[in-house]
Image: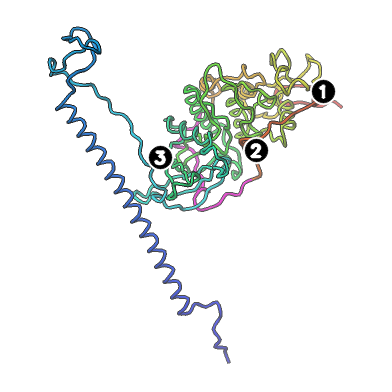
Amino acid sequence: MASTAKSRWADDEEDATLEAQRKKEKEEKKRLKAEKARKLEAEKQASEAAAAQAQQSQLEQGANGPPAKRRRVSPGRELHGGDEGPEYDATSNSNSKLLRFEGGAFGRCRSVENYDKLNDIEEGAYGWVARAKEIATGKVVALKRLKIDVKDRSGLPVTGLREIQILKDCNHRNVVKLQEVVVGEDTSRIENIFLVLDFIEHDLKGILEDMPEPFLQSEVKTLLLQLASGVNYLHDNWILHRDLKTSNLLLNNRGQLKIADFGMARYVGDPPPKLTQLVVTLWYRAPELLLGATRYDRAIDMWSIGCIFGELLTREPLLQGKNEVDQITKIFELCGLPSEDTWPGFKRLPNARALRLPTASKNAPATSFLIRSKFPLLTASGVSLLAGLLSLNPGSRPTAKEMLEHEFFHQDPKPKQEALFPTFPSKAGLERRRRKQTPNAPERGQQAADFGAVDFSGIFSGREKEERGGGFSLRMI
């Protein structure tokens, strides 16, 4: 006889009632949120209309009744003496009009309640990023909440102010666009500040981690050209990014690359001012920064581009140091040891004074040879570009403009058209990322590393027995 007992996992009437109640509460909450957003938008439109009406009334009042006397602004007018000096009678020139300019005005930021959060994307060094949808238009955007320490009484950190200012000033196809700044409902809490940015489906790091094969060389050229174009725009406008890495480079499904995350960026002048050396994520940090330089320029961004170039070829970060000392060791292993000939004045840097380096040798391997050994399939022009970007001497690195004109991009295979770029499933939509452990960018207040006495005298020991050739090396036994 079959058992008629009901499974305890089966849905009953009570479950159905609870489900219907939950659905009703959710719909009511969504309706209230939409109604609140409409009210806020109506209030904003009403305030703008009132401001426009007040401005119009001021203009009309100024046109109907100009002041009787004004100070002389040009010769040739009828002058009248007085106790306060010569003035002219405005009534004698009734056809003249004041020159007025439209100026910007301060207004309240829109509320973050105008956006409906869809899912979290990731947490960066300077903020949390989520995918959201604007309720009024249905447009999907990226919502970045600035990281602010509520215990810090200095208010909004300078990194957040710089990021907002720089993104508002930038307008380039390869730089992420800031649409607006919104605030939370409780405006008394300073941590409720959000940046509304373009939503881009991928970042290069996530793509590289999931690709079974590296990018084709034509695709690498397309990505590098877009990156150099964006960086050239920043440098032309006196902006240093100071944290270029694959996780800060976004790529949409139309093959367009955009530079993002300007939390460490800042404006500079010429000559550059004294700056902090604690910038750029460790694996992409230039050697002059590791050796304690406090005056640097756009060459630090070009070094980061060289590290990104190598990562695009191998799908792995090029220089994965465990700390500052290990990082400079890996740099010397790839790029050779510095000398006064290759890098004049490097010994005057704070962390370079205690380094023990071997005496200069004519048989020391050159940077291009070491890079050729690591990337045997790269063309001669590609090795030339990569060796230039990874030059220890900052003055020897090409600028972004010079990089755009390099012969590497004019040789076959030609850069692939963006429209023909491969597409990838978006991880930023509804799926959390599973990332490998990588270092974060330096944080404010962090102490710089002190190298002390580090011995590099044996870094290339044994290489004198190698026979060198075009792109390969043989060890003689």
Q: Is residue 305 left or right of residue 131?
A: right
* Residue at (51% x, 20% y) in the render: 401
The answer for how far apart the CA atoms under marks 3 and 2 are is 35 Å
Residue at label 2? 316
Give neighbour class at mark 1: few <14, some 14-19, many 20+ (Cα, 10 Å). few
Residue at label 1? 457
Q: Position of residue 173 (x, y in %)?
A: 43, 32
Dot 3 amino acid type: Glu
Q: Is residue 159 left or right of residue 353?
A: left
Is 341 situated above or below 276? above
Q: Position of residue 476 (x, y in %)?
A: 84, 25
* Residue at (56% x, 45% y) in the render: 123
Q: Which residues are magenta?
A: 413-435
Q: Residue furthest top?
A: 76
The reply to whether dot 2 and dot 1 touch (C-beta < 8 Å) is no
In the rendered image, which quarter contains the N terminus? bottom right
Magenta includes 195? no
Residue 180: which disc? 3
Dot 1 amino acid type: Ser
Question: In front: mark 2 or mark 1?
Answer: 1
Question: In front: mark 1 or mark 3?
Answer: 3
Q: Is residue 142 left or right of residue 287?
A: left
Q: Position of residue 278 (x, y in %)?
A: 64, 30
Q: Residue furthest right?
A: 477
